[in-house]
Amino acid sequence: MSNVQLFTGYWRIPWREYFTERHKEYIGKDLGSLVTVINKPSAIEEKCATYSICNSYNAYLLKILNKLFHFIGKDYYANKKIYNLILRKTRPNIVLFEYGTNCSLFGYECYALGIPFVVHFHGHDVTKAYNDEKYRKSIIDICKKSKTVIANSKCTQSRLIEIGIPESLIKLKYMGVFIPEKPDKLPDCKKLKIIHIANYFKIKGPLETLKAFEFSQRLGLDAELIMIGTGPLLSECRNFVAEKKLCNVYFLGSLENNEVLCKLKDCHILTQHSIRTMDNSIEGFGLSLVEAMAMNRAVVASDHGPFREIIIDNVTGLLFPEGDWNAQGRALMRLANDRNCLKQLSLKGYHRAKEMFSTHRESNVLRNILGLRK
């Protein structure tokens, strides 16, 4: 049996990203240990050895040590030495690093001990390389020492090549979601229900979506807009709704994943207006779009980053130009006025999700990359 170590920044906290937890499920009995940076997972709950770098030592003393080492040019030296001890104790056959940012700090400890490792990039860890020269040099160097680099989309793959990662090292692995055997029925109600599932950051375009909804209401749209998430732009979005006196907009805050999926099931359309930000950030993937397609729900999204890999325009969903909320509003209006088109897009989106983005497919790809039996 293999002894895989999964390394991630955090585990089972409210704003976590569930796809990293699914990787644990794919690795299954081959998982020997789970290592986090900030919060220690429960060994009983996870059914494997668990470690946390910041909880393995007195946190206050660790902070002082790292500050002292920083002055002599050895950033996070104390953290790295703790991880070195964890590696010596667990002796994994291979380590899967979630995020290039984690690997840039801790991958060298694996290399020093001759332990193979894989780096999984998700999005912001690529963007950082465009804006931080020290990080870019580090990530290029450590990736060249890795067994494999995983990109979560062709868009991420292209950006990795652009910053200097050898193409021969990169493997593509799309995120997977649960796909029902049969497509769910669309809600049987006259009023169109639209949902936006994303935290309130500029890249997610929540304000643009509200502008699109306001524009479509002026065109006569009879619909509800449900907004799920939290973040720094939430107050600005609430103020926009109040200022424009928008009706039928509901802010539900941050919800657990199962609650989010229940809300999604009650809607006809998922919409997202992601945009490239000033620091060159773009989405790495579009998991909420795939979840909507898997539920047989239509998707209306900006032509942004990897979204064209997920959505075939006018076949499995509708794409509109990034930054054009009028076009987004018209797309929503189109589906409100043509329920047959909405049904066709939903059904074809479901079949594309089933073919391309299932958990079974993702599991097989990941296990193959890690050298595990299927």
Image: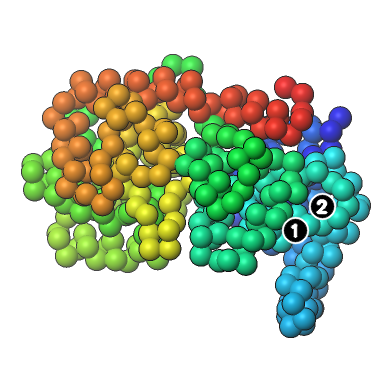
Residue reaching furthest to the right: 89
Q: Is residue 167 visible?
A: yes
Quadrant hosting residue 351:
top left
Image coordinates of residue 305 in percent, x first then y, are 40, 44
Q: Residue at x 43, y 40 (%)?
A: 306
Q: Residue at x 35, y 62 (%)?
A: 234
Q: Quadrant of the N terminus?
A: top right
Answer yes or no: do the residues labelled 1 and 2 have beta carbons within 8 Å? Answer: yes
Image coordinates of residue 145 in percent, x first then y, are 75, 49
SS of the residue at dot 1?
Answer: helix
Image coordinates of residue 214 in percent, x first then y, are 16, 51
Determine crowd level at label 2: few under 14, some 14-19, many 20+ residues with C-alpha closer than 10 A: many
Residue type marked 1 = Phe
Q: Quadrant of the C terminus?
A: top right
Quadrant hosting residue 207:
bottom left
- Front-most of 138 and 289? 138
**Left or right side of 282 for 41:** right
How far is disc 1 from disc 2 in space, using C-alphas? 7 Å
- Front-most of 11 and 26? 26
Q: Is residue 196 visible?
A: no
Image coordinates of residue 265 in percent, x first then y, are 38, 32
Q: Which mark is residue 106?
A: 1
Q: Which mark is residue 176?
A: none
Residue type marked 2 = Cys
SS of the residue at dot 2?
Answer: helix
Q: Residue at x 74, y 77 (%)?
A: 73
Residue that mark 2 sits on = 110
Q: Residue at x 50, y 56 (%)?
A: 127
Q: Is 29 located above or below residue 118 in the figure?
A: above
